[in-house]
């Protein structure tokens, strides 16, 4: 299982920076951030369950749903909030490689790369799905907003972790 298999499975090239990350660091796990290891991502295609279940794909919508036990109604076309064609297009165009929590455990920034090899994040809070759909997902169907490097995103995730850690320390005093 390796980078070539990931590229084949997601039907797009794996960005050079992500390849370097996998070959040198491998993954990132802390209380508030999780960039998946390559075996974790590929395990989805082999039916290996995660803490939250089994992913349908590594696409951005399926990975957000997975984090919520595959039970978020707003990402289920049968519920009428999003069309199946939109789910399919978003999943095909944006591959999720992890997430970090900038505020609390009810929200996360999902880290993805697009077909051009650019990185970005999308913010999802369980109580703000209407804004996510209108402000982020619909525009993402037309053009990719990804304009960051993976290094910039990792730095943002670490800054968020430090802020949350400091907030926890302040609460303990």
Image (cartoon, rainbow, N blue to C red):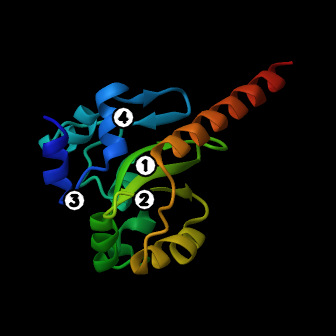
Q: Judging from the image, what secondary structure is the residue with disc 4 in?
A: helix
Distance of label 3 from label 4 (alpha carbons): 17 Å
- Residue 21, label in figure: 4
Pointer 1 local density, CA inside 10 Å: few below 14, some 14–19, many at least 20: few
Give coordinates of residue 12: x percent, y percent.
22, 59
Pointer 2 local density, CA inside 10 Å: few below 14, some 14–19, many at least 20: some
- Residue 68, label in figure: 1
Image side of residue 75 versus residue 8, left or right: right
Distance of label 4 from label 1 (alpha carbons): 26 Å
Q: Which residue is mark 3?
A: 12
In the image, what residue occupies the spot 43% across and 49% down? 68
Are discs 4 and 1 less than 8 Å apart at CB?
no
Q: Which residue is mark 2?
A: 72
In the image, what residue occupies the spot 55% across and 48% down? 108
Are discs 3 and 2 less than 8 Å apart at CB?
no
Asked where in the image residue 48 lies, by quadrant, the reply is: top left
Image side of residue 108 versus residue 63, left or right: right
Are discs 1 and 2 less than 8 Å apart at CB?
yes
Q: How many marks?
A: 4
Mark 4 or 2, which is nearer the eye?
4
Distance of label 3 from label 1 (alpha carbons): 26 Å
| Precedes in sequence: disc 4 or disc 2 | 4
Nearest the eye: 48 or 3: 3
Nearest the eye: 56 or 147: 147
Mark 4 or 1, which is nearer the eye?
4
| Precedes in sequence: disc 3 or disc 4 | 3
Distance of label 4 from label 2 (alpha carbons): 30 Å
Mark 3 or 2, which is nearer the eye?
3
Q: Judging from the image, what secondary structure is the residue with disc 3 in?
A: loop
């Amino acid at each position: 299982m390796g980078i070539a298999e990931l590229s084949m499975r997601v039907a797009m090239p794996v960005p050079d920076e992500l390849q370097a990350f996998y070959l040198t660091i491998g993954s990132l796990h802390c209380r508030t951030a999780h960039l998946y290891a390559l075996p974790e991502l590929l395990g989805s295609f082999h039916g290996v369950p995660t803490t939250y279940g089994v992913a349908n794909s590594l696409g951005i919508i399926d990975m957000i749903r997975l984090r919520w036990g595959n039970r978020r109604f707003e990402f289920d076309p049968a519920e009428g909030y999003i069309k199946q064609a939109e789910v399919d297009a978003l999943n095909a165009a944006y591959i999720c490689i992890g997430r970090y929590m900038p505020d609390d455990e009810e929200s996360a920034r999902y880290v993805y790369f697009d077909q051009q090899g650019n990185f970005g994040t999308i913010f999802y809070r369980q109580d703000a799905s209407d804004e996510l759909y209108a402000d982020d997902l619909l525009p993402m169907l037309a053009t990719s907003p990804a304009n960051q490097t993976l290094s910039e995103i990792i730095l943002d995730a670490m800054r968020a972790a430090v802020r949350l850690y400091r907030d926890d320390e302040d609460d303990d005093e």
